[in-house]
Amino acid sequence: AALVQHVLFMLVYKFEFYFPFASRLFHQLVILNPIFSDVAGDITVSVDGQSFLLHKFPLVSRCGRIRRMVAEAKDPDLSKLELVNVPGGATAFELAAKFCYGSNFEITTANVAHLRCIAEYLEMTEDYQEENLIVRTEMYLNDLVVKNLEKSLQVLCACESLDPMVEEIGFVDRCVDAIAMNASKEQLVSGLAHLECDAGSGKLRMHCQDWWVEDLSALRIDYYQRVIAAMRRSGVRPESIGTSIVHYAQTALKGIERRHVWDSGPLVGDNQRVVVETLINLMATEKITAVTLSFLFGMLRMAIEVDAGLDYRIEVEKRIGLHLEMASLDDLLIPSMQTSESMFDVDTVHRILVNFLQRIEEDDSGDLSPCGYESDGLKSPSHGSVLKVGRLMDGYLAEIAPDPYLKLQKFMTLIELLPDYARIVDDGLYRAIDIYLKAHPSLMESECKKLCKLIDCQKLSQDASSHAAQNDRLPMQMVVRVLYFEQLRLKSSFSGGHSGGGGEYCSFSQRITMPISGSGVPSSCVSPRAAGAADSYASLRRENRELKLEVSRMRVRLTELEREQGMMKQGMRDGRPGEHGRAFFASISRGIGRMAMFGP
């Protein structure tokens, strides 16, 4: 009986091969057992090292590729076939073989992609049998998958191991488009269902949750990129896309731990680098702005961690620069990955600050005054934003100043970047420079002078000035400038409460109006001996020891002046300026007379 059935199979095969147009009629006349369990197999098919003992007839009746291989074989009694590059491997081929034998099995979202690809590979078209496997999988795809967002996501996830066949047949594109279209429809329906009207203002508000945000994180990064691009085209809300990108990054990059300068282990793999670069490129090409500043800083850190390309890092830095005033100090403290450099990545912060200043220059070129103050433009950064960045950078400078490896030039460059109006007071800058001087005692005197010139002594508060006057780390010229402007402050404070002074006060006012030289040291216009200013400055360098002694005396005198000023104010409030007022004027005159010797 087995021999008879085997002969029958061969006759059917020969008949179909030579009379293909009559094959369908023949199958209607011949009734075959769907499972040939009682007939020995006559062909062994090898797929990925796994062998299947099968029968030629059910395979050649539905599979064009196997029919062609058998027909082209030189051996008429071919008993072995080897299939290479089979999409889905042995598992997918086993399902296709069951279909050829007529066995019942369920097509699901987990196997439809594999079945569609193996059907394409085996050429299971309608030319060989009606309702062949390609048609059956297409029916399932069109009727159940593309109309449902969840099923489309599941099928797309199952496509990851089926390259390149799954791409060649356009299966991925159909799933991507189905996901985007269904997400757009769901948002529209959900938005209409939850639409509310604010009775107070008449504004419409929408409340809906996008469940698919988390499910998209299961996709491979290249599939995810295509889905997001399709969602942008189909009109999905930018906020939902931004939330999805944040969730995908948190899921895909959660295994990356922060490395430190002293770590010498290997860097992370290329897959994580591809994820970071793809997400950054996605935000740039699709113009996705609905992400938080903290996420951008996180992506910047990740880009540094995985050694992403410089272009990707610069793209994130530009986005951060647009909202730098909203950043915190912790955001800017980015560890450096170079062991030979400073502990913090100062170059990255420098580029971010440059982008912020370029944004001000570009956006406010026609809207701001030369001083850079706020205009009426809707997109113009306010002066308050610039002040926030100034305070932020002063805090950052103070944090990085103790780093013994921080080069002076980098430190000064960060200070010089900000315009003058970014700081109302220079107390924060003075604190940062003082910390740097303390942490770098080996600086040359010329370097200390150059650094301290960046401080505007007129912007120092009284507390900062008092500290600077007693700070041994500051150059002598800096101390002199601080004392001089402290004298001016005392004079201005007094004149504000006693504007009706007599001749002695007028003489004092004329003498106190001292211009400042290019070096920042007050010139000696307080006396007629101004012609010897240059010689006085030269002698200052030669007589350093005497200067220190004189400055110490002036510190003591400054304390006395402050005490006398307080007594004078108290006397004016009591209506008795007499004795203390004359003593105060005499003290100021003597103090200014002493300072004339420090001018250049």
Image (cartoon, rainbow, N blue to C red):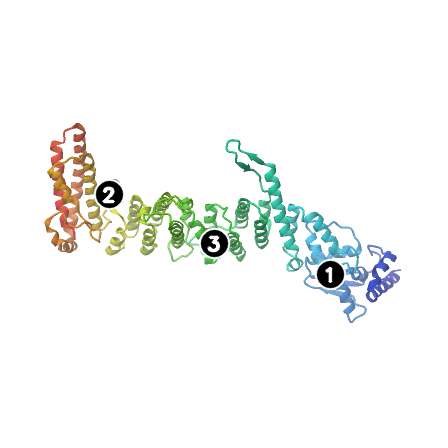
The reply to whether dot 3 and dot 1 touch (C-beta < 8 Å) is: no
**Residue 538 percent location from the top left of the image:** 15, 56
Residue at the spot of label 1: 122
518 horizontally vs 406: left or right: left
The reply to whether dot 1 and dot 2 touch (C-beta < 8 Å) is: no
**Residue 291 percent location from the top left of the image:** 49, 46
Sequence-wise, the earlier of marks 3 and 1 is: 1
Residue at the spot of label 2: 465
Q: Name the image quarter holding the N terminus.
A: bottom right
- Classify 10 Å Cα crowding around label 1: few (below 14), some (14-19), many (20 and above): many
**Residue 306 percent location from the top left of the image:** 48, 55
The reply to whether dot 3 and dot 2 touch (C-beta < 8 Å) is: no
- Classify 10 Å Cα crowding around label 2: few (below 14), some (14-19), many (20 and above): many
Q: From this viewpoint, which residue is outermost toward the top?
A: 574
Q: What residue is rendered at 36% in x and 47% in y?
A: 368
Residue at the spot of label 3: 303
Along the line of sight, which residue is nearer the eye, 451 or 529?
529
- Classify 10 Å Cα crowding around label 3: few (below 14), some (14-19), many (20 and above): many
Kind of residue indicated by mark 1 = Leu
**Residue 312 percent location from the top left of the image:** 47, 56
Question: Marks 3 and 1, Cα distance to the nearest angstrom?
Answer: 44 Å
331 horizontally vs 241: left or right: left
Q: What residue is rendered at 46% in x and 46% in y?
A: 294
Residue 208 image-quadrant placement: top right
